[in-house]
Image (cartoon, rainbow, N blue to C red):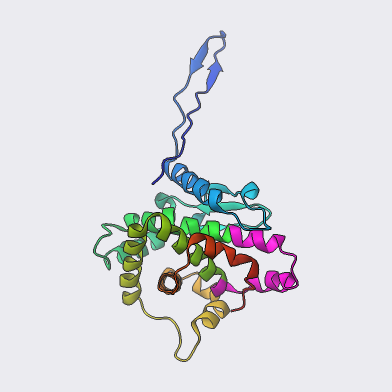
Amino acid sequence: MKQGLVFFFILVTFSGNGVAASHQPLKSDPVLAQEKAIAAQVEGRAQIHGFELKAKAPKIRIDAGPTLSHYGTVKDNVVHEEHWEKVPAPEQASFNHWATYTTDEPSGRALFEDMFYRFFFVHELGHWMQIQVLDQRHDPMAARARKSSDTARWQLETVANRISVAWWREHDPQYLAKLVNDFRAIEAKLPNPIPPGEAPQHFFTREYDKISTDPDVYGWFQLQMVILVYDEQPALNFQQAIDTLPAENYDN
């Protein structure tokens, strides 16, 4: 990973007799430092003609709770991630189980960190770009696109995954290939939740509230979407992936 700058602040207080007493440096958060470093790289490349993205870079907070990872709104403009230690026990159990389906992830924690501290972090930055572009669009389809994006769950996730796949294919293709191979192995072991004859994107959108509460079901869909994007031909580079955003109307 690229190393970010970590700043230590030494707090100085004064005792009753006016003598300064120094405290221990504040501990840095390696997850936050790592993600800020990745974000700086992505933001440096987030250039789409006619749109202002870099000046609207999101804040990053390690406070996602049970959702594990999400981008807020154009107003609060925050990417939320979470520490493994604060992942709810049932979800930790799912990651521990999934890790056994792979040949190279020694634990659920290792799998979680490979997934969320890198791939799905850039995925959330993809959502940041999606929402910023939607907010700044003034073309004839802009209003329809904004309205559709409220419910187009499959397409929203697919586009964000496409951005992350393109980023990691350029910046660490070995990591991406390993991760997708793990996703294939895990998905193959999970039950396919799609009813016979149902279109995956329609089922995912219609049942999203229910699906999102089941780690294995939601996980199956998210892994499936990443695999489908990874296998797309021709493979888009990062600039090509983000250049599609102004014309994306989020029709499932």
**Viewer can see residue 115:** yes
Residue range (magenta): 129-155
**Towards the viewer: 235 or 180:** 235
Point out residue 246 in the picture as x, y percentages from the top left corner. 64, 66
Residue 37 belongs to the span the image colors magenta: no
View extreme (bottom): residue: 197
Image quadrant occupied by the C terminus: bottom right
In the displayed structure image, the side of residue 123 where residue 247 appears, left or right: right
View extreme (left): residue: 103
**Viewer can see residue 150:** no
Point out residue 194 in the picture as x, y percentages from the top left corner. 45, 83
Residue found 31% across the figure and 62% down from its top? 178
Secondary structure, magenta segment, majority class: helix
Q: In which quarter of the image is residue 93?
A: bottom left
Residue 130 belongs to the span the image colors magenta: yes
Task: Classify 234 as above or below 126.
Answer: below
**Towards the viewer: 20 or 242:** 242
Task: Classify 248 as above or below 166.
Answer: below
Point out residue 207 in the picture as x, y percentages from the top left corner. 54, 78
Residue found 41% across the figure and 54% down from its top? 171
Point out residue 155 in the picture as x, y percentages from the top left corner. 56, 73
Residue found 65% across the figure and 61% down from its top? 133
Q: In which quarter of the image is residue 92?
A: bottom left
Residue found 65% across the figure and 47% down from its top? 55
The number of discs equals 0
